[in-house]
Amino acid sequence: MGKKKEKKKINEKVDVEAVEIEDDTWWWLTHKGIGATFLCISVFALLVRVAVSLHPYSGAGSPPKFGDYEAQRHWMEITLNLPVLEWYRNSTSNDLSYWGLDYPPLTAYQSYFHGLFLRFFDPDSVSLFTSRGYETYVGKLLMRWTVLSSDTLIFFPAIFYFAFVYHSSCHSSRKNDCAWHIAMLLLNPCLILIDHGHFQYNCISLGLTVAAIAAILSQRELLASCLFTLALSHKQMSVYYAPAFFSHLLGKCLRRKNPIHGVAKLGLTVLGTFTVVWWPYLHSTDALLGVLSRLAPFERGIYEDYVANFWCTSSVIIKWKRLFSVHSLKFISLTATVLTCLPSMVQQVMAPSSRGFLYGLLNSSFAFYLFSFQVHEKSILLPLLPASLLALEERRPFKWLMFYGLFSMFPLLCRDKLVLPYFALHALFMLLYLAPCGHGARPRNARPNNTKFDYFDSFKTFMNGFIYLSSLILHIVYLTMHPPEKFPYLFEAIIMLICFYQFAVFAFYTNVKQWSLLDHSTTDEEKKLI
Amino acid sequence: MESSSSTRQLLWFFAIAVCVKLLLIPAYHSTDFEVHRHWLALTHSLPLSNWYADETSPWTLDYPPFFACFERFLSIFAHYIDPQIVDLHNGLNYRANSAIYFLRISVILSDLWLLYGVCRLTKNADVKRRNLIWVLIVWSPALVMVDHLHFQYNGFLLGWLLLSISFLQEGKDLMGGFLFAVLLCFKHLFAVAAPVYFVYLLRHYCWKGLFRGFSRLSVLGAVVVAVFAAAYGPFLYHGQIQQVFNRMFPFGRGLCHAYWAPNFWVFYIILDKVFSFFLKKFGFSIQIPAASFTGGLVGDSSPFAVLPKISPSTTLIMVLLALSPCFIKAWTNPQPRMVARWIAYAYTCGFLFGWHVHEKASLHFVIPLAIVAVQSLEDAKHYFMLSIVSCYSLFPLLYEGQEYPIKVLLLLLHSILMWLGFSTKFTRASAPNTMVTAKKKGAQSKSIESSSPAAEKGGFTIGWVGKSYLLGLLLVEIWGQFLHPYLLGDKFPFVPLMLISTYCAFGIMYSWIWQLRWIISTT
């Protein structure tokens, strides 16, 4: 019996090997199994992160406000030196107008622990008042290491969990694909540039989200809801994913014998996690409202800078800020967001599936990015995450999205003096994407064998090529030329227009794709059997 | 078709490395950066006759003329980028971004020569072997640390060496000799292998009967003389030749560098210390020279308390003695396939017994050995140890906190890649000879075998001695980095470095003995 099984296994292996015979290039990397492959790629990814962290951070040497680096350092200073209830309250010792804490409590706790670490090695860097604008060699090093350690401790294990679940569920997936996918996930240039260059801790909330997604894929809904609640309590931007989580879990519960029971269990888990995290602020409504008002900075307007979303792009023609009050804008943007989320939510409630869930995450985060209130350039990281989780299925669109995601952050990264890492990471991503014998290099069934000349298709290719080329040229123009004095933000606006167009097309495409899952759900299963 | 796709793959490996190297541009660089910048300025602003006479900066030109010409070539572009880089006086200690980017990128681009060498060496190897060699050389952590962090042009120079080896392996001895002569005119430290070249070429190329042999010898001699004439002729013409040699061979320097390279002399120094300590205990009066080695500067007086003083000629004799088995082998049985081993062995001897050896010189044998590392299981095991030890011995070069994670991760990544690569290549099922004959079948059966635990037995494993030695490496690092500063504070600041070089010296000695045994035992 055992022998038979082994023989069968061997036969299977031979089959796989027969397919891979030309993929010898990577066989040595993948033959030890997913663990060794992951270890190898993650050490490389870590090396790249450390190398990026050598470069300047946002607001380096630019008083009086500095940048995100100073904000994070300031939060460490505040959380370390003030009692918990004072963290979000304006007072003589906590000037909220100077980088006041505006993320949920988990970020504050994280700042506290990182502050302890900083105080141990360099007490001056987090002393109250006197440490404002503290910029030293050691200080920068310690701060960078806090991000690196958060990345290693949260994001990397989460990705491993996801890769393990994702690649063990579909048995046909080849080892090379798995390695390629891990590389795509861990070497996401946007995330690396923002976290280790610009300086933020997106790796924590995104890592928690990935872990939650992996938990859902492995049917552990309670764990998933707990992890996602943690992600929400770390960065409120995680709410971009909430519709997908909500609709998928709801759809699953409705399919059970006892839907109410399922929903109640999930609800209690979410509430319980929230209670634990928010405990210090639950004693009075004032405290809670104080924190909540810090999290929703409506006074900052519907958009800032030049973000490639609907409001900012359309403001070239329609001056939203002048036409509507903040209050009505809030309402309009909320309606628009909900409306765009709705199709993908309905699909998931109707037919919850793992693939559909991943598409749902992509669609809901895109809906928020394109239509919600107060979106930042950096928020493109949120749609990029589910896109990279789907990278194996959507290879070319993924590359496309990564390219324009990076491009949309180009002006921001230029301001941070991160041009060199921008190009280096961009090239690195493309190289890994096109790895020899990997899948980027020769897409499967790239072109169906029809001899008929398709006008629409060739027009599409032409348009895409044209936009791609012009964005490459724009990179150079942006770096070398000065905009005309009349329009100082001309280049930013063009970049924004191009990116918005691409994002909108992409969001439309993925919505269609998610809905088409509904029709093909049966044929897909048949395919898997074959 | 086959070769173009392999070139493309090699370029891919190289491009990945380039991306990482570009990211490392703002990292720490040693004074060697200023040395090379100054040489750019010097060769750009002074006439040839003054290159070796100039004393504007303490970093006088002390590489052979071809390297000076190389700097002259680079300085043309530097002048366009930013004239201040090549300004002899205003450029001193110039550290603007333009200078840093220019010099760093010049190193990255000069690595293309190494790439060409590797490409030529591996063009006939099978896919798996080829990929492994690329990983070992193109992604070498030691090269990244020395060239792209510390700052030097070793990749470029090693490219010449690899090219020379590739010609020798093909039996094109004249070309191999020519390239080696050129290399010597780039950096004279490579001359350690010259005796091996001499013996091998004399026997393998020239020893073909009286008339043919003599004509070949004269052709070879003419080629070498022509190369040296091209390099040194202009200085001879300007009457500068004495000055050139004074600069190139500064024997005023001591036996050991400030940081001891992990070689034989480490044991000698320690033995001396131990002797003097015990003799003192027993009541002998012994004059111990004050901090003779830890200070780094050694004057004329003997730095040893008990043991005899070592002179440069002693080291030369020792190197030649250590090389003699290799001469005998090269004479009795000159085989092209052994050339890489002999050359690497020569550099190992030079490293172990040479005068004023830098720890960076370990690159000279670690990189050529990568070519033979994939030939047998024994080679792979040896290379695994040697490569880790030599890379670790370079750690003190990058002493600042910012680069600490980089060097650790580089070594870790390299070890993991080697482990994965070697253990794929050497499972029990794939004895080297079956590999070559039945490649396709072998690949299939191997994957099956490797999945069952029994097959692992004969595969790539490190014995307990090796494992405990590598573990000791970890302990040395933990002591030096964490425990020593914590327990002893600022006392004995030289101890961690001494520990590293002593501990690594054991590994290098092992490698030397292993190579020696291999050379003697193979027929």
Image (cartoon, rainbow, N blue to C red):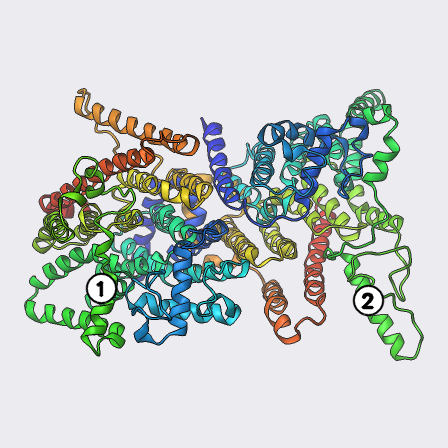
Kindly identify which residue carries mark 1. A293
Number of numbered discs visible in the structure rendering: 2
Q: Is residue B186 left or right of residue B271?
A: left
Q: Is residue B268 left or right of residue A502?
A: right
B214 is higher (above) or lower (below) than B158: above
Question: Please, what secondary structure does the residue beneath circle 2 have?
Answer: helix
Write down the chain letter for disc 1.
Answer: A
| Residue ranking furthest to the front | A92
* Residue A294, horizontal then vertical, whole percent: 25, 63
Which of the image's four quarters has the N terminus of chain A?
bottom left
> In terms of depth relative to the viewer, which is nearer, B520 or A387?
A387
> In terms of depth relative to the viewer, which is nearer, A425 or B350?
A425
Kindly identify which residue carries mark 2. B271
Q: Is residue B464 left or right of residue A296?
A: right
Residue B32 lies in quadrant: top right
* Residue B427, horizontal then vertical, whole percent: 49, 52
CA neighbours of label 2 inside 10 A, class few (<14), some (14 to 19), many (20+): some
Residue lying at 52% horizontally and 68% vertically, measured from the top left: A122
> In 3D space, how far apart are the residues under numbered discs 1 and 2 (Cα atoms)?
72 Å
Can residue B162 be seen in this snapshot? no
Can residue B115 be seen in this snapshot? yes
Which amino acid lies under the numbered mark 2 shown in the image of this protein? Leu
B411 is higher (above) or lower (below) than B220: below
Residue B195 lies in quadrant: top right
Which amino acid lies under the numbered mark 1 shown in the image of this protein? Ser
| Residue ranking furthest to the right | B285
